[in-house]
Amino acid sequence: MRRYLSKEYTFRRKIQVYEELFFRLIMLLASLLIALVLLQIVWSIFREGVGSVSWEMLTNTPKGGFYFGKEGGILNAIIGSLYLGLGATLLAFVTGLPVALFMNTWLAPRKRLVNLVRFTLDLLWGIPSIVYGAFGFALMIALGIKASLLAGIIVLALLILPIMIRAIDEGLKASPPGLTEATYALGATTSELSFSVLTRQCLPHILTAILLSFGRAIGDAASVLFTTGFTDNIPTSLGQPTASLPLAIFFQLSSPIPEVKERAYAAAVILTVIILIISILSRIFTNKYSRNTIKF
Amino acid sequence: MEANHKIRVENLSLRVNGHEILKDINVSIPENKITVILGPSGCGKTTLMKSMNRLTDIYPEMHVRGRILIDEEDILNTHKDVTAIRKKMGLLSQRPYPLPMSIYNNIAFGLRISGRKKRDLLDKRVEHYLKQASLWEEVKGRLREPASSLSIGQQQRLCLARGLAVDPEIILADEPTSALDPISSQEIEKKFLDLKQDYTIVLVTHILRQAARLADHVIFMYLGEVIEQAPAEEFFHHPRTEITRAYLKGSIN
């Protein structure tokens, strides 16, 4: 067959082969670059911080003079961050899941409106968290609420709500129309479809959404800067101010004392490890609970 | 036609974005018989079937006009609860869509949403319907496993059992064997011949031989119109129109 191909054709074919090679190379380089940057960040945090992580640091609240390099730990910030992250994720989940389900069931026929909602959520996703912090602060002043755990949870929940909704929404969008038809054909109502079938089918997506949101919530400094205050104590109620790891890192890193700076890196190590543990746990759960999902 | 008519469709037309998918359909579907809706791909046969249990409601771009009478009751122009209408019909789709839950719960789901929640009763009913769909022997030891672990032929029989569990009077089947291997297809076909004692079956297919094997009554559609409807014997041996003759000879596809 070969000899029937024109010269021009074989030339173009050759160019296409090189084109393919070129783009594969570029993609490979880009992936390598991203992996390198990530490794570099993790490496520098661990290099600077791992030496200062100690049992004392994990189990004590700051003692007098802690911020000048004296004794104590950051248990207050670890617990505070877990409270903030879990509280905000819970709040965003119970409000976000119904929204995502609503968008894909009742609201689904109004495609333009749904797309507008999606666009709005994507915009909100992109807004810097300091804006959420400032907004939350303004709201607190208007309502007369003091800086507290509750205020922080609410602002963080607002911050991660768009992530939560859109990540679940993407899963629901990918659910096949045939499954919806089959469920309706059994005489199911839209709520039965939503909560018994769609949530099960999209469980892996929902878990991913929770993980993404939690990671963002626990790691965000700017939105808790004005809203939670900062304290050396572990909060015992929603109305009390609370410390958090990102702010502990921020305050200690700006210190001129080398020991304190090292502790900032140690706090960063702890934050990174928490997020790592949550990621691994959620992967395990995703595999365990996605066994019922129907693959198409 | 001698038998009672379970479903009557009168002057049904359906438009999608100004394009007419179904044009003035008038058909009758006899009770306790297998009615085959036959026609080439894209002729509107699936759409006609879906409008019978109002699945067309989910797609706002579909505008339906006309009347569909089931037991002499109009199901299109009514304020009656649509879930009650749909419970009268079991649906079997082109490829099986088991629910994302265990084999047991796939059957129990329909029972639960119909308000039957007692454990021992559920167990009995699940067994009954799995037996009716000839699936019981294959799955009785692993009812708690996810439905997705079944083969596709088993999944289709599970969907049949699930449909029967809501106690319908009509079975709507949309090319139910198109994703199945020959042996699973045969099992489904055999099942239909058994089930027509108790159910009115509407079967959409484009496979002529399948139609010939199963049909008591045939509705032949082409480009959104009903060209011919007749008892199977008459349809296959004495087709009345030129288009039907051409289709039966295999020159339209």
Image (tube, coloured by chain):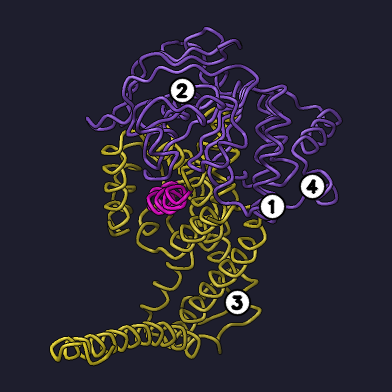
Chain colours: A yellow, B purple
Span highlighted in magenta in the image: A151-175
Helix, strand or loop under label 4:
loop
Which quadrant of the figure contains the N terminus of chain B?
top right
Above or below, comparing residue B73 to residue B60 in the picture: above
Q: Residues within 10 Å of mark 2 (few under 14, many from 20)?
A: many
Q: Nearer the viewer, residue A144 or B88?
A: B88
Disc 3 marks which residue?
A57
Question: For residue B229, which numbered disc appears in the image?
Answer: 2
Asked if labels 2 and 3 share a chain, the reply is no
How far across and down, in percent of the image, does residue A251 sit?
A: 40, 72
Q: Residues within 10 Å of mark 1 (few under 14, many from 20)?
A: few
Tag nearer the camera, 1 or 2: 2
The residue marked by circle 1 belongs to what chain? B
How far across and down, in percent of the image, does residue A210 sit?
A: 51, 55
Above or below, comparing residue A74 to residue B14 in the picture: below
Q: Amino acid at mark 3?
A: Met
- Disc with the residue nearer the chain's start (4 vs 1): 4
Tag nearer the camera, 1 or 3: 1
The residue marked by circle 3 belongs to what chain? A
Tell whether A130 sits left or right of A44.
left
Distance between mark 1 and mark 2 Cα atoms: 30 Å
Distance between mark 4 and mark 3 Cα atoms: 51 Å
Look at the numbered discs 2 and 4 and tell me whether their residues touch, using CB distance below 8 Å: no
Kindly indicate the quadrant of the structure image that contains residue B59. top left
Tag nearer the camera, 4 or 1: 1
Q: Nearer the viewer, residue B202 or A135?
A: B202
